[in-house]
Image: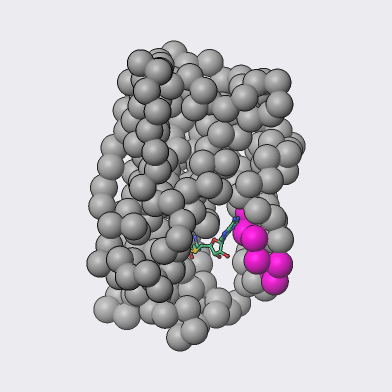
Amino acid sequence: MCRMSPIKIGSSGEFSLGGENFVIEIGVPPKDQHPSTPEIFTIVKNDVFLDKLFEPSRMSAVEIGSEPVPPLVDYISRTENRFVHFATSQCDGEKLKQIVVDELADELDLVVDDASHSYEETKASFEFLFPLLSPGGVYVIEDWSWAHHPDYQSPDAPFSGRPALSNLLFEQMMLLGSTRLISEIRVWRFLYLIHKAKGAVRRHDMSQNVESGSVFDQIVSRGKEWSLI
Ligand SMILES: C[S@@+](CC[C@H](N)C(=O)[O-])C[C@H]1O[C@@H](n2cnc3c(N)ncnc32)[C@H](O)[C@@H]1O
């Protein structure tokens, strides 16, 4: 169960929520960003710190960087049922499954993927986690549209040799059309959310493993192949 709280954001991106202070540094190059301190968390997104906004009963996060962020570790240590795993990839299916079962008491209502933004890794996480999502649950993917932004068009731009993340959105739309697993996909310029159908089954054995295959195997497309852009 979640509760929304109003947020007032100052002219320099600073705000307080649930007794914690934040500053938004979106659009600031990583080398110029201020690290989080015990007094104020730096966040690289618009006016959200999901834990304070939604107040879920449990929350876990994974981060591939191996360097712990001390203010975050401190926050976790004084907040019940909050967990963070550094040096953990979003593609580590066994770890993700263990987190859902052990830390989240086997209840997954919301997934927010703001990690690699790569097609392969974002897809891998979806293949593992979507089957574990509760019916009626929500799966959010951020920054899906980078391949269509002017800054990513040149051959030496970041990710230039990689498939666009929007390929995944196309595949999820085909999944929406092919099955009863998804009730709706809502798309904004920088993020989209997928609503798992209330009538869908939550199945551990559907998460990606050798026996069950991928959820995307359920796409039907008259036998025609598609290719990545
Ligand atoms: C755009 S930042 C978002 C950070 C945070 N959500 C925020 O708003 O401040 C993306 C983060 O994902 C991490 N990341 C990149 N690839 C990852 C992967 N494969 N698995 C887990 N985390 C990854 C990066 O190290 C980085 O900290």
Secondary structure that dominates the magenta span: loop
Which percent across, then down, holds residue 101?
A: 71, 33
Q: Above or below — where is 156 with respect to 49? A: below
- Is residue 93 among what the camera can see? yes
Furthest toward the bottom, the residue is 32
Q: Nearer the viewer, residue 6 or 47?
A: 47
Q: Above or below — where is 168 with respect to 39? A: above
- Quadrant containing ligand 1 reads bottom right
Which percent across, then down, holds residue 121?
A: 55, 48
Q: Nearer the viewer, residue 36 or 77?
A: 36
Q: Nearer the viewer, residue 112 or 80?
A: 112
Which percent across, then down, holds residue 206?
A: 61, 22
Which percent across, then down, holds residue 4?
A: 37, 47
Q: Is residue 122 left or right of residue 94?
A: left
Range drawn in magenta: 62-68
Question: Residue 114 colored magenta?
Answer: no
- Is residue 194 among what the camera can see? no
Q: Nearer the viewer, residue 85 or 209?
A: 209
Residue visible at 73% across and 39% down in the picture? 94
Q: Could you say which quadrant of the image residue 223 lies in?
A: top left
Residue visible at 46% across and 56% down in the picture? 162
Residue visible at 35% across and 74% down in the picture? 27
Q: Above or below — where is 173 with respect to 32? A: above
Q: Could you say which quadrant of the image residue 225 lies in?
A: top left
Question: Residue 66 colored magenta?
Answer: yes
